[in-house]
Image (spheres, grey):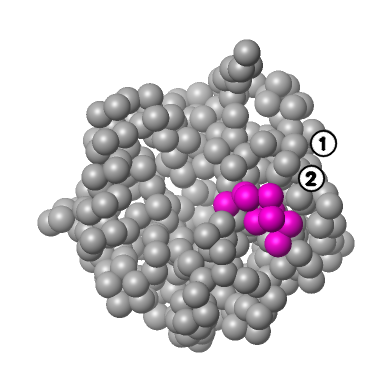
Amino acid sequence: MIKRRDKFPLIVELEPLYACNLKCEGCGKIQHPAGVLKQRMPVAQAVGAVLESGAPMVSIAGGEPLMHPQIDEIVRQLVERRKYVFLCTNALLLRKKIHKFKPSPYFAFAVHIDGLRERHDESVAKEGVFDEAVEAIKEAQRRGFRVTTNSTFFNTDTPQTVVEVLNFLNDELKVDEMMISPAYAYEKAPDQEHFLGVEQTRELFKKAFAGGNRRRWRFNHSPLFLDFLEGKADFPCTAWGIPNYSLFGWQRPCYLMADGYVPTYRQLIEETDWEKYGRGKDPRCDNCMAHCGYEPTAVLATMGSLKESLRAARETASGSRG
């Protein structure tokens, strides 16, 4: 008899380090003390946490994971166990380190691109990063790697800036898939003025998705999550669907908020009051529409509906042809 679990992970956010080679204005990760920034998670601990959770997918972030001296071994062991691995990177070290990795249907580089050249370089506070990321993506593609992108948008963005960067990634760079997210207000982020509110997010994506763009772009999102972003649907937060494991342990409730840490995945699931989080429940969540809380809800709603499952298949096929 199969034991049914009410809460289970779709993907684990693994952060084997907090150190980074950039100082992005919208990120609070590098605000940790110097002693913490020097730490690197052992391979066995990183792999063990993923196995403990039972998640089929892993998103390795940080910090900049390519700064971890054994990141290739972490990836190798996870892929060996048939976990789908996305290595999130700003790509500054990608061309230097790419020889350490092997192409696999279970592995993809997820390169962070927040806009075209001027906009992206401004968001990461360093010139030349966009051009290096583009060259790194081309090199990874040339070597046979799957390449996805992750783009965060702020209240300084317009529908046009969203369209421009997604058209570039989709049509010119031809990345395999794209992820998008409205910026969430990290408590420790240096820039607290440019995070999007809920209505701003809905208006931004509603206009950007118009004119057939949404069907044409190759998104790594469920159609219901895209509905959610543009205000066609609303969902409760299910942060337990994308748990975070970092140097401090399992972080509750999600990788964007730190209300304490526990050493085991079971404690995270069983000892966290999940019902108290989400928009309308915790003031810190009021402007959050991040994928870590709402994509799992959308995915579960899709899986529970034949109509939505067929729709997802159609939109995926449409995007792949675009």
Q: Is residue 251 above or below residue 115?
A: above
Q: Can residue 286 be seen in the rendering of this structure?
A: no
Q: Per the image, is 238 magenta?
A: no
* Image position, residue 185 (x, y; %): 52, 49
Residue 90 located left or right of residue 161 = right
Q: Residues within 10 Å of mark 1 (few under 14, many from 20)?
A: few
At horizontal 82% and vertical 49% (from top left) the residue drawn is: 45
How many numbered callouts? Answer: 2
Secondary structure state at the residue bearing disc 2 = helix
Q: Which residues are magenta?
A: 76-84
Give the quarter of the figure containing the N terminus: top right
Whether the magenta-drawn stretch holds residue 82 is answered as yes
Toward the viewer: 322 or 130?
322
Does residue 113 sit above or below 9 in this rendering? below
Residue, disc 1: 263
Residue at 59% of width from left, 83% of height from top?
Answer: 95
Give left or right: position of 165 versus 56: left
Residue 303 at x, y = what percent? Answer: 39, 30
Residue at screen point 55% across, 38% down: 10
Q: Residue furthest top?
A: 1
The residue lying at 48 percent from left, 67 percent from top is 146
x, y percent for residue 38: 83, 65
Location of mark 2 (residue): 48
Residue 246 image point, x, y percent: 74, 49
Q: Tag 1, which secondary structure?
A: loop
Mark 2 and mark 1 lie on one chain; the one further toward the N terminus is 2
Amino acid identity at mark 2: Gly
Residue 241 in view in this figure = yes
- Eyeballing the image, is 291 above or below 85? above
The amino acid marked with disc number 1 is Pro
